[in-house]
Image: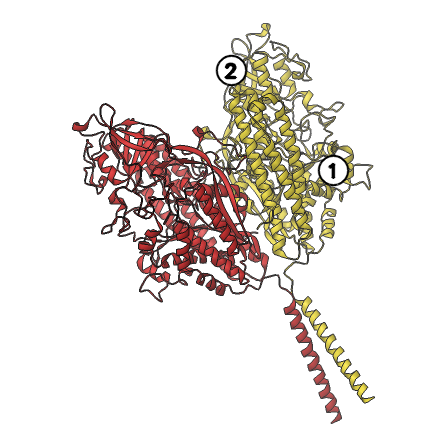
Chain colours: A red, B yellow
Amino acid sequence: MRKESRWIRWIKWIVIVTVLFLLGFCIGWFAKPSNTQNHKDSSHYLKDFLGEMKADKIREHLRKFTQLPHLAGTEQNLKYAEQIMKEWQMFGLDSVEMVPYDVLLSYPNESQPNYISIVDHLGNEIFNTSLAEPVPQGYEDISNIVPPYSAFSAKGQPEGDLVYVNYGRTEDFSQLQRVMGINVTGKIVIVRYGKIFRGNKVKNAVLAGAKGIIMFSDPADYWADGIQPYPDGWNLPGRGAQRGNVLNLNGAGDPLTPGYPAKEYTYRFSPEDGVGLPNIPVHPIGFHDAILLLNNMGGEIPPNNWKGALNVSYRIGPGFTDEFKSQKVRMNIHTNNQVTRIYNVIGKIRGAQEPDRYVILGGHRDAWVFGGIDPMSGAAVVHETVRSAGRLLSTGWRPRRTIIFASWDAEEFGLLGSTEWAEDNARLLQERAVAYINADSAIEGMYTLRVDCTPSLHTLAYDITKQIPSPEEGEEGVSLYESWHKRDNWTNDRDAPRISKLGSGSDFEAYFIRLGIASGRARYTKNAKTERYSSYPVYHSVYETFEIVEKFYDPSFKRLQAVAQVRGALIFLLADSQLLPLDVNEYADSLRKYAQSIAQLAQKNLRAMEMYKVSFDSLFSAVENFTVAARDFHERLQTLNKADPLQLRIMNDQLMYLERAFIDPLGLPGRPFYRHVIFAPSSHNKYAGESFPGIYDALFDIENSADPAKAWEEVKRQISIAAFTVHAAAMTLTPPA
Amino acid sequence: MRKESRWIRWIKWIVIVTVLFLLGFCIGWFAKPSNTQNHKDSSHYLKDFLGEMKADKIREHLRKFTQLPHLAGTEQNLKYAEQIMKEWQMFGLDSVEMVPYDVLLSYPNESQPNYISIVDHLGNEIFNTSLAEPVPQGYEDISNIVPPYSAFSAKGQPEGDLVYVNYGRTEDFSQLQRVMGINVTGKIVIVRYGKIFRGNKVKNAVLAGAKGIIMFSDPADYWADGIQPYPDGWNLPGRGAQRGNVLNLNGAGDPLTPGYPAKEYTYRFSPEDGVGLPNIPVHPIGFHDAILLLNNMGGEIPPNNWKGALNVSYRIGPGFTDEFKSQKVRMNIHTNNQVTRIYNVIGKIRGAQEPDRYVILGGHRDAWVFGGIDPMSGAAVVHETVRSAGRLLSTGWRPRRTIIFASWDAEEFGLLGSTEWAEDNARLLQERAVAYINADSAIEGMYTLRVDCTPSLHTLAYDITKQIPSPEEGEEGVSLYESWHKRDNWTNDRDAPRISKLGSGSDFEAYFIRLGIASGRARYTKNAKTERYSSYPVYHSVYETFEIVEKFYDPSFKRLQAVAQVRGALIFLLADSQLLPLDVNEYADSLRKYAQSIAQLAQKNLRAMEMYKVSFDSLFSAVENFTVAARDFHERLQTLNKADPLQLRIMNDQLMYLERAFIDPLGLPGRPFYRHVIFAPSSHNKYAGESFPGIYDALFDIENSADPAKAWEEVKRQISIAAFTVHAAAMTLTPPA
């Protein structure tokens, strides 16, 4: 017994010792701080973040920031900037600053209004277009409403015969000159708005030799059937007209300081050497005035696709019918360009683990008048996003990476605020920016979601919309994804909601196409299949008020709330996920489609391709190479030890820099600031994004080239550049050593 | 007693429990693997690494790789590449590969030799220059020795009068035309080698309208007093001549594929559209032949600084004296350009912790003939460095970052191998390269060390030379630093060995000036104060043999050993230090000096500066801003928690990307591949690095400009770009958020 007892005591002792040791060991093990942030699952923070965004608050923000006109460079737009800065500070951002630049803007001359006349043979003005739009009810006493004008128009009073050139597209001018045999040298052209960016219309008119250009909003393009004009509905009244800049900047930013931020010490070109400024007068009118200019036009009746919906014949001219032959059209344009101070507001939340990784949510603040839709529906959404992020910060959350919120100025004058800031911060951005999410108008229709983004963001866009409820009435319990999917399925080859390429025409341009930062945008849109007007009818008119949103576009403000949640979830997950939510397999899939599609476009000239030995093999082989590299990369991600902060950072860097790999430092031919080899605006329409734009433009030029052998050489050169770029991008996905 | 006993037992128990717990805790604490690599002090590894580099081995390597001529594009140069690849593999690198490109090279026509004649009035050749250099003893049976020629010369047989234009510099042509009133249109110019890169002489001749250019080695520039010509000494024999390319690439790499790697699928421009190819015949001769061409020249006697050391009058022409007036000079040049395959050898040691950070040691392998000095003295040093690194790997060492060794091809034809590889890997390099150390000729004199590097490497260069012994006889126990310091103290304003700016003319160009990777080079050099010849006398001649090094330049091979240790220590510490050994305060100091010096240069035109309101204030203010940012950065480094791998990486990234911040994506005016705003070769001499080259060139142009107002506008623009770039670089050093 005694022996046994001793044995038992020994065993007891050993058990106690072991237990105590293990206890100590475990406490030691877990007490030691780990360098790998034991990343708390951030999904409950995401839920709080999205849940905090309120429709009513968005309504309030929109109401607050659409009271007064706030054109870029005006006092009121500075006041709104100051207010936004103050409120973002109150919301709890770590820092908010105002960043000024001095850029070239353009305003009508207050003492000499712009208008267009019909003059008789004595030079008397027998008809003048209206000097302003009728101001909507409730806004009659508001001053500083800028009348419709074309910003950066040349000054002048050209007089001559009108020629009607449909939408003013490259193909319209080509048809006019080649098929109809009409030369517009020394004429004033009149074109309807729509289809392409207005700056491209102006460039085409200049190239064709016109001495002035008038643009009008045709009901065929800016009128929805069965809808009343504002204020009884959301159609454009006959006396409404579309403002807008008519530059051809190709991404240069401020015309006088291309490539460099427009600071106080910055060298400025003289206006004659400025980038993209038209050298002829340009002016926009509504359809009420257009009828009177078009009514007596002579010349031939054009083909049906040149005819709009006005009760006129759309004869192309030149000039009026015999009866009115002695009458001419005179443009009276006195618009001034002037260097003016603008203000971006930049707010930041410092990242906890990777402060040197930036996720940007940026949208503009300046508006042509009140900006009810463009841009304040977007700015209100950003405001609410900031408010909600501030609330989350106050509960102890801090994102892994730095989030930057931007309220850009002077977007309407050529994306100036965002481009100057990108130029100012180019070094930081190219090394540190993970993604840029754009926040222009959050709504342009009442139908469903619209997302345009780089392919690596596709999967994230789908994932987050599955977590956001549909804002549509009668769709309780339905996700935004389902609602969107039902309304806008991609194409036959994929059962998923449509996501489009990014074009241009908003502030993501410098970030995506110049710097190669993964970018995306989201908004509520119209039904593209049935609603054929460009943008939305009251676009850039005085009728873009708070009320048009409240009465027609989004009375419950739930659509804007949904857009806020989409934009917010994008930046949240990009900033806070341990592993960046970018899908490189999606990029591979897209590249394959684009390569097929550009090769198919070239096939139209099959005989020439054979003659000049043009082959897309190198491009297809590069895409294949990329596809394999992308697949292997995702496989390696499976075995990544996320607890190792360096290994994680290395793979995140590969994900982040993938978009950068598509940047060609030499730029596209003649467009040094458009450097993305996969995506850039078409040379013929800034709004439309083309894939493989270098090849696309080279193919486009074949038709107009006097030297087809040389033109095909350029196609071959562009294919080679595209193939190299895709190979180079694939290389960035392989193991780094 | 019993109670006490129980108490004591309790105390015993508590002590035991506590001790066991603490034991467990400690074991648990220390057993847990730490994510921060407890970085072993790598200094003993460095000592082993440097100690392993042997003079005898370098001698062996040099002997082995100088047996046969190995011009770029020849079979022998491929054989050496294969041998290097094999030996690097044997030495133990993780991977070695051969990377081919197909670039434009240029060779003499084997059946039609190049030469220059004097022809009489009947066109008979009454004197011909030699077709080859006399081959040195021991090499008589060697084939494939390419005769002296100017690579990429145009073909042709121009005939005309000679005009002597000194060194063929911009200022020489200017003096000829403006002061001496001589127009060289339709003439053949003859210039002496030296002072500037030969390609610049050719460009100047083309601009001046010459129809051919002859270059000769004057003893004034290629002859050391009291030294015998080879083989009895290291001077250039009278029949020796300097080969070399005469391109004006401005960093483009392969002339037919500027901006893109010359791969199989790459689009090639036609030769007429190639970059930098001269359109006139060019040919080099020795001074023996030069005497005969210059001897009978007529025209005026030039100023003394145009006179070399030949026993001729150096009359400038045009043409011969009256007596020989009917005689003309005819060039017979049949050199062919042809696309040829070249091979880089790339070897890697994978980094243990940061495989995606690259430190590169690269030098060329191709030689004009044997390459005894250029480049094999450098290649032998690289070879020994690789061998030593392999030994260290076998002892268990592995560097923190990846090391890349490169044996470049076709450097002599325009830095082609290194530039094509940089183009091929541009995305990886700009995101991942920490530094590039160049390894061309390791010796060009017998006096002391020469280091050219970016300012942030100054401190490292000083630190390591203090750890390396002087190779000079009688300096046992003296450090290389002391030996160097004694022989070449910087300037009055600093008591330290001189370090110079990087110019161009070797393979670091694409890495430093195009991509903005911190770069440096080190070699043994002559006494710049007393030895006035350019490079070294036998430069690019057949007399660059193994023997010239063994007999004259470095009989003990200790100088080459010292260079190997300098280059080796640079890459070792850049690759293996936890914190990158880059000193941004040095960059600030250098920027201040450069700003003062360029402002001073401008002051020469004080009145014009006032008239055109030219000020350097913005640049000085930017430099001040940079200085503060650099100081603050180094202060923050003091408190950096190096145990936190992310914090360490973030600051290392700031250090790495600083050099990148000086890159302007738009490039210097007209030179898209020279993008470094602080350092680039002068437009007037590729060899010379200028600080603030944009401003420098703009100031240079003032003197020749027909429109000074416009020329001064360009100066202002360049000052603004420089100021912006320095501000932008400063921003990269501030806390990232």
- Residues at discs 2 and 1 both on one chain: yes
Tell me the tag on residue B559.
1
| Of the image marks 2 and 1, the number of the one nearer the N terminus | 2
- Residue farthest to the top, as pictured: B323
Relative to the observer, which residue lies in front, A710 or B281?
Answer: A710
Q: CA distance from mark 2 to mark 1?
A: 48 Å
Task: Spot the residue most to the front.
Answer: A141
Residue B499: x and y, percent? 70, 35
Residue placed most toward the observer, A260 or A238:
A238
Amino acid identity at mark 2: Thr
Q: Position of residue B627 (x, y in %)?
A: 65, 40
Name the mark nearer the viewer: 2 or 1: 2
> Measuring 57% from the left and 34% from the top, which residue is drawn there?
B722
Q: Would you say A637 lies left or right of B11 here?
A: left
Tell me: B696 left or right of A708.
right
User: Where does the image place residue A112, in percent across and percent down from the top left?
Assistant: 35, 31
Taking the spot 52% from the left edge, 53% from the top edge, the residue there is A89
Quarter that holds the N terminus of chain A: bottom right
Q: Disc 1 on helix, strand or loop?
A: helix
Is residue B429 placed above or below A104 in the rendered structure?
below
Using the rendered image of the protein, determine whether residue B540 is visible from the camera's viewpoint. no
Residue denoted by label 2: B185
Residue at (53% x, 58% y) in the render: A399
